[in-house]
Amino acid sequence: MKKLLFLIILNSTFYILNSFCFSQQNKLDSLLTLLKKDKEDTSKVNHLNALSRLFMYQNPDTAITLANQALGIITPVSSPEFSSTKDGAVENKVNAIRANTLGNLGSYYYLKTDYINALDFYLKALKIDETLNNNKGIAKHLGNIGNVYVGQGNYTKALDNYLKALKIDDGLDNKNGIATHLCNIGSIYCKQGDYPKALDYYFKAQKMFEVIGFKNDIASILGNIGSVYGYQGNYTKALDYYFKTLKITQELGNKTSTAAFLGNIGAIYSTQGDYPKAIDYYFQALEIDNELGFKEGMAVHLCNIGSLYTVTGKFKEAEQYLNKAIDIDNSIGTLDYLRQTEELLSILYDTTGRTKEAFFHYKKAIALKDTLFSQESKKQLIRKEMNYEFDKKEAATKAENEKQQAVATAEKHKQQFVLILVSFVLVLVFIFAAFVFRSLRITRKQKNIIEVQKNEVLQQKEMVEKQKEIVEKQKEEIVESITYAQCIQQRILLEESAMRHYLPNSFIYYQPKDIVSSNFYWFTKIDDIIILAAIDCTGHGVPGAFMSIIGNTLLNEIVNKNHKTLPSEILRLLNLGVYDALHQKKDEDFLVDGMVIALCSIDYKNNILQFAGAQNPLYVVSDNTMEVIQADIHEIGGDGRITKIIAPIKKGYTNNVIPIKKDMSIYLFSDGYVEQFGGDGGEKYGTPKFKELLLSNHHLTMQKQKEVIVSAHADWKGLTDQVDDILVMGVKL
């Protein structure tokens, strides 16, 4: 549902979100009274800055005007207070106020989506705070600079700034700053589609914000969690979080966030097919952002409205709104939003038969996607995060080494004291030769202990250096393999919307356990026959992902190239292909690399469904009853010792023919869903529960069923880790 679920992810900005409470008329009146009495001094500057912050969300232009007035006072020319002394303390005070004012201006321009001016003011403020060694201010500006880069679609630079800010605030134990940076890092992973990692960062930030008690930040993090659930297809949870957020932002008078989540609520209703509610929320959001002049929000809402008009057949209006969105995206340089809008415009033209225009905008969307989600970009994101974690571990190791060295030094001083004492005693009792001899022996032992301790410290230092080299090498290898495998796997999978073009009432629930998955789904239409499959490959992570690429390639060759459409024949040829590709005919090896699969063909012309499976069955629900179409026991590819007994060329698969009935539903899946541990007793979900879940909800639309399946899995899993890749496909015939 990426094409229709166009959600706004809010970045928490340390200064913007945490400094102020809205709707404070009393404070506004008080500040206006004070400004009438103020002279051209620091008091007036502080009062102007405070007043500008009151207007920042409702009227950013007024906030900019007030902040510029404050900045004009802090110059040697305009104020005797700032020009008549060379006192260093006064100069530092003035520079601190100047940095704060410049940072305010950056935030106001950020709210207007004027990223060029916002970045310019943030960098000026950062430079001043660096000269003052104001670490808290440095972290604040780095976080805000990261937000600008996110708006421009430069996620690598954004993550770099967030991690630098997080490191500084971690050292200061600034919980507010730490929580903000965690939230912003989570937003980057959400935009990259890594939803489990995004939720991990969001939940950490939520706990800290709830302790601190800043309602604006709590609203932002709740809304972002809702967006993740929306992208995962759990629309009930998404709406629950959005309405909680909307209530908070409306109470605070935060119009920017209110507009964002009105738009997000509209996107969820649109995905659920409730178009009147969706369009109402979209226009509410657009009206607020028009009033504020918030171009990024305007672009998102225009895009959502255009997408909805495409779905409902209002093609002229759809084209009008989508083109307005593209104009704004180009003017503010938001590459990610521009990519999605170009993609939606391509869909509109394809739907209306304007193939030339559709292809033109499709190419532009692909070019932007390559820019935003290139392999090198993802590699840099993972590398920067791993560098941050490694630096933390390295600092801890260094602290431990310094502690050990301090203990050794103290011991050395102690031994030196003993030596001095012994020498003094030797002078006094020289005549006692036996005692002197005994004392010399003790001294020699003490010197040996010191040498041993010194050697141990040197050995520990060498071990730390070697471990550091090993970790660096392993880290590079991990980054290379994971990002490359993820890039390849994402390229081969079709989006859910492609299948829904031919099977409108269908869904795909695809949730990898790790970054890459051993599960994959496959779909094609050939000779008026629709073929779809759910495949689970041997292993997890990178090895499983490479097996999925082999399977995808072979299926494309067998079906799309050689025009084989009989399920049992497809599986027979797929088995031979895997067997040959992995050289599993070696007598000395019992190779077990392969895959299990459920594959079916839908022939509406002859009104029949055909199925063949290797270990994975097909569930058919009709007339409130479920029939399990069993698969063959031998898998695709190597069965270990079985392969030695039954040659692959002799393996055959059963072809099941099923008449299509009205409102019949079919389900293909891997074992990841039923294998999940959770519940009160920590047991597996199990096949019986899964069957009951499908049977009790088969009367719903397939998108509603997906929502129920996603929610049931999340509730069952709770805080338990996901144990396997998950793939469930459903089609109502």
Image: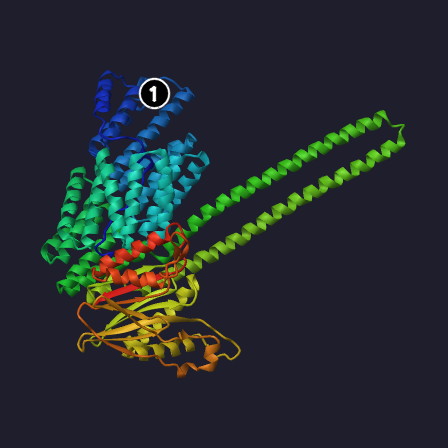
Q: Residue at x 42, y 81 (%)?
A: 648
Q: Residue at x 43, y 51 (%)?
A: 383
Tell me: residue 85, above or below residue 458.
above
Side of 512 where 623 appears, left or right: left
Location of residue 692 (image quadrant): bottom left
Tell me: residue 570, above or below residue 186.
below
Residue 550 showing in the rendered view: yes
Residue 156 showing in the rendered view: no
Q: Residue at x 31, y 55 (%)?
A: 712
Side of 477 where 149 appears, left or right: left
Side of 602 where 200 appears, left or right: right
Here the colouring is rainbow
Location of residue 311 (image quadrant): bottom left
Q: Quadrant of the C terminus?
A: bottom left
- Residue 455 location in percent, x, y? 68, 44
Q: Quadrant of the N terminus?
A: bottom left
Foreground residue among 154 and 117? 154
SS class, disc 1: helix
Q: Amino acid at mark 1?
A: Phe
Foreground residue among 712 and 465? 712
- Residue 288 location in percent, x, y? 17, 40
- Residue 307 location in percent, x, y? 17, 54
Q: Residue at x 21, y 47 (%)?
A: 265
- Residue 428 location in percent, x, y? 84, 24
Identify the residue position indicated by label 1 in the image: 82
Foreground residue among 52 and 513? 513
